[in-house]
Each structure stands twice: as C-alpha cells, then as structure tokens.
Amino acid sequence: MLPLRNVVSWTTLITGYVEAGDGETAIHCFDEMQHEAIAVDAVTLVCSLKACGMVGAKDKGQDIHADVARAGLENNLPIGSTLVDMYAKCGLLADAQKVFTGLPLRNVVSWTALIAGYTDHGHAKEALRCFDTMQREGVHPDAVTFVCSLKACGLMENVSKASEIHMQISRRGLERNLIVGSALVDMYAKCGFPRKARQVFDKLPIRDVVLWTALIAGYAEHGEPGEDALECLAEMQHDSVSPSSATYVCGLKACGNVGSTIKTQEIHVSVAKQGFERELLVGNALLDAYAKCGSLVEAHHVLDELHVRDVISWTALITGYSQLGQTWNVFDALERMVEENVKPNLATFVNVLNACNHAGLVDKGERYLESMFSSYALMPTVEHYTCVIDLLGRAGSVDRVVSMVERMPFHPGIVVWHAILGACRKWGNVYLGRHAFEHAIRLDEKDAASYIAMFNIYADASMHHEAHQIEAMRVEKQAFQLEKLNNRSLCII
C-alpha cells in the first residue's frame, strides 16, 4: 500500500480499471479518492465519466458533470467530448446534444460520440443528419465515425446513403480497414445486398468469425434461397475458421429455407461436437430447420433434449405439424406447452387456427380465437380473424361470418373481404357476396381479385336467375375496363 496517494496514483488506478472494462470499480475508486479529499484533474474526470458511460451510471455521471461545471471545465474539449459520450451511452440524448451544442469547438471525437449515441438508441435519421452537418463544418470522419454512420444506414435500410459513405471510405483508403470493412459487410447484408457484402468481404485482409457470420446471415435472409449461405459456411470451415453458435443459427436458417434435412443433420453433428446443441438459440434453430424440412421426429427429439423450452421452441414444432396437416399433434403440442407454463404468442395461434381450418374444425377454431383474449390476454390480429372467417365460410356458416365481422375490434381489411367472397362463391350467397365486394372495392377500387370473385359468384348463380346473368356481364365489363387501365391481364374463371 502506498504511504502517499495523490491525484496521479489515483488517476492511474482509475484509468487501469476503465481500460480493463471494469467501470464499477473505477467509479468506486473515484469516490474513495474524493473521500480522501484529493483534488481531481481533467484526466481523472475524463476517465471517471468514461466509467459512468460504460456501466450506464447516469446519476453518477450527472454528479461529475456538476463537479465539472463548478470547476469551470465544461469548455475543456476532452471533458466536453467525454460528457457527450457518457450521456449518449446512458440514453440521455437531449443532455448529450445540449452539452455538444455548448462546446466552443467540436472535433471528430465529439461528433462521433453524438452520432454513436443516436445510432445506438435507434435514432438513425438524426445520426445521419449529424454526419452530414459534421462534414459541412469541415470536420473529417474517422474510421469509428464511418462505422457508426453505416450502422445508421443499416437501421434505416438506406442503401443509397450507404453507397455515398462507401465511396468516401474508398477515397480515404479505408475499405480494407477491418473495422470499417466489417461494418460495410454487415450493413449490405442486413439491407438485402449480400453480393455487395461479398465484394467488400473479398477485399479484406483478415476474415474472422464475426465477419463470416455477418455474410452468412445476409445470404440466409436474402440469398437464393439459402444455398449461398451454406456454401459460405463450408468455405469458412475450409479456411479453418471455427463457426460460433450465431454462425450455426444462420446456417440452420438457410437449411430451413432450402428444405434440406441432410444439410440440417450435417450441421447438427457439428453443433453437437462443439457443445452448442443445448443452447436455446441453437436448439430452436435446429428445431425450426427440421420442422421446415418436414422432419418432425427429429424436431421433437431436439425439443425433448433442450434444458429450457420457450415459446419459440414450441411454436416452431407447432408450425411444422400445422404445415404437414397433423392437426391433432398441433393440439397436443399446444397442450404440453401450456402445461409447462409457456404462454403461446400470436404466431402460435396463427398455426393453431390454420390447423383448425385445414381440418374443418369450426367450433374448435372459434374457441381458440376466444381463448386468445380470455386465457392469454392476446389481442387477435386480422390474420387470426381472417383464418376463422375462412373456416366458417368453408363450412357454410355465413351468418356466423357476418356476426364475426361485426364483432371484430377493427375495420376488416381487403384480405377479410376476399375470404368472404371465396365463401360466398362456394355456397352461392349472392347477397353477402355483393356486400363483401362493395366493401372490398371501397378499400381499393382497382382490386382485380374482387372483380373476378364477384363475376364468378354472379356467373355461378346466373343459371338460376336471369338478373344475376346481367350483373355478371356488368362486373365482367368493369373488370376488363380495369384490365385496360392497369395494362395487365385478368383471368376470369
């Protein structure tokens, strides 16, 4: 223990903890230093504010800000920039902007701190506005500024702006910088341009697991339809880069897109070897891939092996059963899910109601729709109501369809009216069909599907009623006028 501790020794200690990522201990040291009545200097304040930003200690940060103001150091550029950074990291963006605006001089550090704050808290438009203003004021972005701005472009899916920034990066010779290059790859991948991401990727001198995963994720989300992602995964392993659990999750998504049980099994073996099999995210991705491939036995086995099963796990299995028409397995899975105190979500019930629809289980479908609100406090969406309306329509329960439409907590959309038109054609209900048709074209007077459906309803009824034949001809004429207007072909069947 030092016999004498001064501002230099305390600041050195605080700096060490900050650089080691231990913000809590750094703040504790700052408090001890003040308790010993040792005057702080600008470096101490900068380090302590960094520590507050690291751990989100906004109250302590505000206390230090008050000390800064009392000492007349608010205009000190390093302290001012760190205050902006601290407030931004704590989510106090108005305070960050206020401090920033009050700075007599703004450099790349202070601008980047503000841009990073807006980006990290989802205010991408503000971040890009700051990026443009910064350059108009003659401050040149650095690598970190570019990274934050590219992240903002990704949040907005603003590829046009990102391309502008990419050109600046190329002119500055930063395209091969690993941090900037990684941000470019991630942004292009997330915005749905995996081939552009690949072009940047191929120029980078080092490709680590994070970079490979960003590229694979881009192909898995936007590839054709998943082969590119799986080829990248194989290439990555050939380059002796070990996939992370996140990489495997992306690869398994691609397997589900392709519908390849064999590829899923191959990844399953690798996942098991690396000990990722029972991680929830990986387990859910495995389960989902097997379910999408129609391999429900394997999917069920993965579910049984998971230590923790959440709503995503169960919904993936239920979706698989529903898509294969295994209606009673859907209900069994839902029952087991509820027994384990896992609350179904909206996606779960879409698949449960689809199962009822495919099996023609009208009463069961209505009960499940009712239970969404009464048992699980879920507000059914238009997709849920449309499914049950379609179910009722197929069963010929036209009166119940009308009653349900009247009870819906929102105005029916065009999809609902299409479902009703389909039911009216099946059961020959011209009156309700006309009602649905009028509502549909009120929502979209150029909706070709509504004209076709109404024509077919009248045409089917015309053999029994001459007036319906006339109406069919009138709707057909309207449909062909619409065809001429839209310059596209309508198929009246």
Image (tube, rainbow, N blue to C red):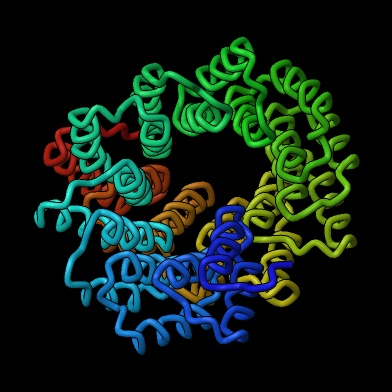
Q: In the rendered picture of this protein, how many numbered marks are placed on residues?
A: 0
The N terminus appears in which quarter of the rendering? bottom right
Position of 443 with respect to 83 (left or right) is left
Q: Name the residue rendered at 17%, 72% in the picture.
A: 104
Q: Does residue 41 lie above or below 313 as drawn?
A: below
Residue 229 rendering spot, x and y as whole percentages: 54, 22
Observer-nearest of 437 and 212: 212
Relative image position of residue 475 (x, y in whole percent): 24, 48
- Residue drawn at x 34%, y 73% is 96
Image height check: is 16 above or below 355? Answer: below
Residue 157 in view here: no
Seen at 83% across and 46% down, the residue is: 328
In this rendering, the answer to whether 139 lies above or below 104 is above
Residue at 24% over, 33% down: 169
Vertical arrangement, residue 462 with respect to residue 22, above or below: above
Q: Position of residue 207 (x, y in %)?
A: 50, 22
Name the quadrant containing residue 261: top right
Q: Nearer the viewer, residue 187 or 219?
A: 187
- The residue most toward the top is 238
The answer to whether residue 145 of the structure is visible from this angle is yes
Extreme residue toward the front, this view: 3
In the image, 443 versus 72, the foreground residue is 72
Query: Can you give x and y, in whole percent of width and height, for residue 453 in the image?
Result: 37, 46
**Residue closer to the observer: 257 or 94:** 94
The quarter of the displayed image where residue 22 is located: bottom right
Q: Quadrant of the C terminus?
A: top left
Left or right of 472 in this view: 3: right
Say left or right for 168 vs 219.
left
